[in-house]
Amino acid sequence: MGGFSELIKNFDKTRDYVREFFIYGFKVRGDFDGKSARTYDNEKRRVESWLGDYLHYGTSERGKQVAITVDSSRIATNPLYRAYASCSFTDNDIRLHFLLLDLLSDGQTHSIRSLTEGLADAYGAVFEEQTVRGKLREYAAMGILIAEKNGKTIGYRLTSETPHSLFGRFEGLADAVKFFSCLPEFGFVGHTLLQAAGMKNDCFLMKHNYIVHTLEDVILRQLTDAIAEQQLVCLSYIGKKKIPLEITGVPLKIHVSARTGRRYLILYDPHYHRLTSYRADFIRSIKTCGRCENYGEYAAMLRRNEDKCFGVSFGNRREGADCCKFHMTIRADKEREPYILERLHREKRSGTVECTGDGLYTFTADVFDPNELMHWVKTYIGRIVSIEGASEETSRFVQDIERMQAMYNGRGEEDAAVQ
């Protein structure tokens, strides 16, 4: 029977466990539908080894619940970065890592054959030349080694540039990397550079630090690569009711929610001939399917339609369909409450704001999906004078306010219902 190991082979599986069991709290052990209870226990122990100081244990009617509890605005380093440092490796990986770096420590350029022979002569470690070649190529891609071609022969040497030497050479670079290590997009890169130089972030804290989204960084990198290379992609996506879907389309842009930090992929779907958005945390895997010849056409379509999205929803419309006109009028005192108007102008996005009366200000926007506005609109309750917009949620919101007004004006529930 295989023993427990903190190392992982499949990060996608670990990402699902961390998200569903320890962050969102959707599941308890009784909900686990994997291979066996032992599998759940092993995954739980791995997470505990990475995040032991941040875990909270509690009980509910559904069973024992384990959750990550942390004030993300008070931590200098995202604890979830530790998950990326838990890669699996073989005995040969370990041996080759130390022995090759020792052979290359003289700073000279060595061929694959000389390194293979050196491993046998110096350490008695016999490896196939193909095995050594694969490890050297891997380290060259990672930037640990530099590959130099001399005729038909490729030689390898250790790079002279290290994070420690770069930080010492360029003033202010260390502080820039410390700041970068806090950012939600690829902050793990900055964190890794600091670790390699034996440094820590001791300068910066992020007030709105959405630490959970680092679990999508692998997916995000693949998406940004596909966008830069104008590739067609096939996504393995978890849809409604946890049903896996295969989606093929052209990735165009990544949108990030200012409210939750959640990332969305904006994709052109050639099957339905429309733009749509997909949550990055629901994407399981990505496969590129070749270069898209009409990429410029689809990117131009996005630019024409993007200002009609208050968030990420393009509605159920194809390009050229009519948008919904949305109006909201609020009351604010320009002299006493300038912060209300400042916020209205700051958060209007593609909408417009104009003074329409004494202390009255009207926000107007043409949007594909008026429902996206409602979370923002509700923050102005108490100041809203009127709302106009053709959507079910807009009508429901107006009806709810009217019922509440009727109730607080002293009329009973039956009278309020009639209103």
Image (cartoon, rainbow, N blue to C red):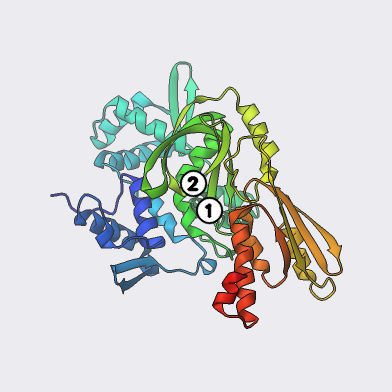
Q: Residue at x 49, y 61 (%)?
A: 77
Can residue 108 be seen in the rendering of this structure? no
Per the rendering, the mark at residue 280 is 2
| Location of mark 1 (residue) | 262
Image coordinates for residue 181, horizontal then vertical, percent: 54, 55
- Count neighbours of disc 2 (C-alpha within 10 A) and say few if under 14, some if 14 to 19, many if 20 or more: many
What residue type is disc 2 on?
Answer: Ala
Decide which of 245, 175 is in the foreground and name it: 245
Q: Residue at x 62, y 80 (%)?
A: 408
> For the residue labelled by badge 2, is the local secondary structure a helix, a strand or a loop?
helix
Decide which of 105, 393 is in the foreground and name it: 393
Q: Quadrant of residue 321?
A: top right
Decide which of 376, 409 is in the foreground and name it: 409
Query: With 48 as the anchor, is 389 left or right in this view?
Result: right
Can residue 237 be seen in the rendering of this structure? yes
> For the residue labelled by badge 1, is the local secondary structure a helix, a strand or a loop?
loop
Q: Is residue 76 above or below residue 217?
A: below
Image coordinates for residue 149, horizontal then vertical, percent: 48, 22
User: Dots 2 and 1: beta carbons under 8 Å?
Assistant: yes
